[in-house]
Amino acid sequence: MSSTNLISALGAGSGVDVKALAESLVEAERAPRKERIDAKITQTEAKISGYGALKFALSELQTAFKAINDAKDFATLAVASSQASAISVTADSSAAAGSYNIEVTQLAQATRWASQSIPYETTLNNNQAFDLTITVGATSTPITISTPTPAGIVSAVNAQASTTGIQAQLVNTGSAYTLVFTGQEGLDNDFTISSASGDVTFQANALQTAQNALLTINGIDIISSTNTVDEALEGVTLSLNTTTSGAARVSLTPETAVVKANIKDLVNAYNNFTDNAKILSDRASEVEEFGGALAGDSLLQSIKSQIRSMITGDYTLYTDSVNLTDPQNTNINAAWQVGLSFDRNGQLQLDETKLDSALSQYSTEVVTLFTANTNDLSVYSTASAGMAGTAVRTIDAMLRSTSLLSEQTTNATQKIEVYQAELVKLEERMTALMERYMKQFSLMESIVGSSNSMRESMKSSFEGMMATYTNK
């Protein structure tokens, strides 16, 4: 029989609710200990949330730095053509800024032959297979027409187009068919075509004769076999649509709007990072979940210091990186020289006028400052990477699974597991304590019950004796 049932079965006792008394005593033991452990869990969970918020802010900052950590991020050029309908211009990241006078005097074109009309009902070559021969330069290619119909000719020629470079079309003129054969642009792709069947003959003259495109760039003669000229200027593709009226003016100028927007994004990302760091370190913060969660945390202070030093550092790039001689960027080697500075509250700000001036006067050195003139460096590279490239590498190291930040998060998670185990043990001890109290109180109730019974018995005996002596 349990202690609780035993007390109920006695039917007598002190009149005290011993179960409630035992529960109160146990709770008095449990409450302060559980409160301390719960407080540790809450505090540690807040730390984990704080580390998560810090990682997110760092990740956003790294993304902003990534937008300006390659030289090609600064290579966007604005393209303009005074005769845009005649010349379409595109430029990639390898193109250089410059202006060009371009005159197009002749477009490239392909040879085009047409057959004589073939009446609808004509039976070609007595319905027997025959050959067409296509000759490009000194190379002749026979094409067997297995299906001797106009459509069969088109199909057979187009099947060999990857070899001959010739495409065929079937034109319905309303009363007959005409076969049209078109080669590739450029004088070297001129071709002739002949047929072994007298039912398929060709017009005496080509509809169009192959020729090269002729143009001049800043007075230099250029010959191109196609109307897409992509080798004359590095990184620039000229699409020739028509001949020009005199020389067209084509200019490629640095597009600073994108660069400025990316640097503004960096300013915002940095300030968001510092705002979050302030919330995390402020014990008085009222931000739920992680406000003040990392107050006094030395790792947070170290990360803040490292991030700030990324902005304030010197990023001179030396040709001789061992002896630090022959600097490549003497005018622009620090963030303040492109308008990035801190106000008295530690907020990063951008002087757009100073940035515009730097981009205008020292665009090459601005690129060196941010990227060290590199592209696509690995985060594990030890080469000079400029301000943005260095920041990307440094933040990447902070976010790795082997970093101190990740280690602190893991340690905090393990602490919670320890605290939860302590709660389980506490409950086990309290359950045992409750059982002990109940056994002790059961014994007490038994003793009190026996004493009460003896008292009542003695009282009855005394009352009987008194009645005898007093005749009552």
Image (cartoon, grey):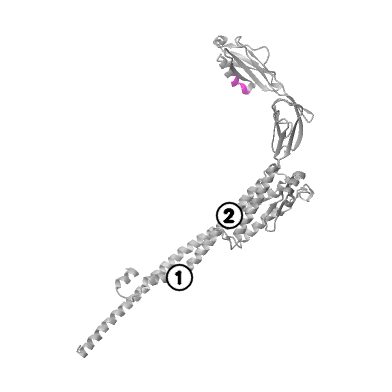
Dividing the picture into quadrants, the one containing residue 363 is top right
What x and y, as percent, mark residue 136?
A: 68, 19
Please report the bounds of the magenta region as a residue range: 156-162
In terms of secondary structure, where does tag 1 sit?
Answer: helix
Quadrant into which the N terminus falls:
bottom left
Q: Which residue is mark 2?
A: 53
- Direction from residue 54 to residue 462 in the image, left or right: left
Q: Residue visible at 27% across and 81% down?
A: 456
Mark number, residue 363: none
Front position among marks 2 and 1: 2
What x and y, as percent, mark residue 376?
A: 67, 43
| Observer-nearest of 132 and 32 | 32
- Direction from residue 171 to residue 189 in the image, left or right: right
In terms of secondary structure, where does tag 2 sit?
Answer: helix
- Ranked by sequence position, the earlier of labels 2 and 1 is 1
Q: CA distance from mark 2 to mark 1?
A: 37 Å
Q: Which residue is mark 1?
A: 29
The correct choice, above or below, for 29 with respect to 174 in the image is: below
Specify the amino acid type for callout 2. Answer: Ala
- The 10 Å Cα crowd at callout 1, few under 14, some 14 to 19, many 20 or more, is some
Q: Report the number of numbered marks.
A: 2
Quadrant into which the C terminus falls:
bottom left
What x and y, as percent, mark residue 38?
A: 50, 63
Specify the amino acid type for callout 1. Answer: Glu
Type of secondary structure dominating the magenta stretch: helix
Residue 10 magenta: no
- Direction from residue 154 to residue 448 in the image, left or right: left
The correct choice, above or below, for 469 with respect to 63 in the image is: below
| Observer-nearest of 442 and 363 | 363
| Observer-nearest of 172 and 65 | 172
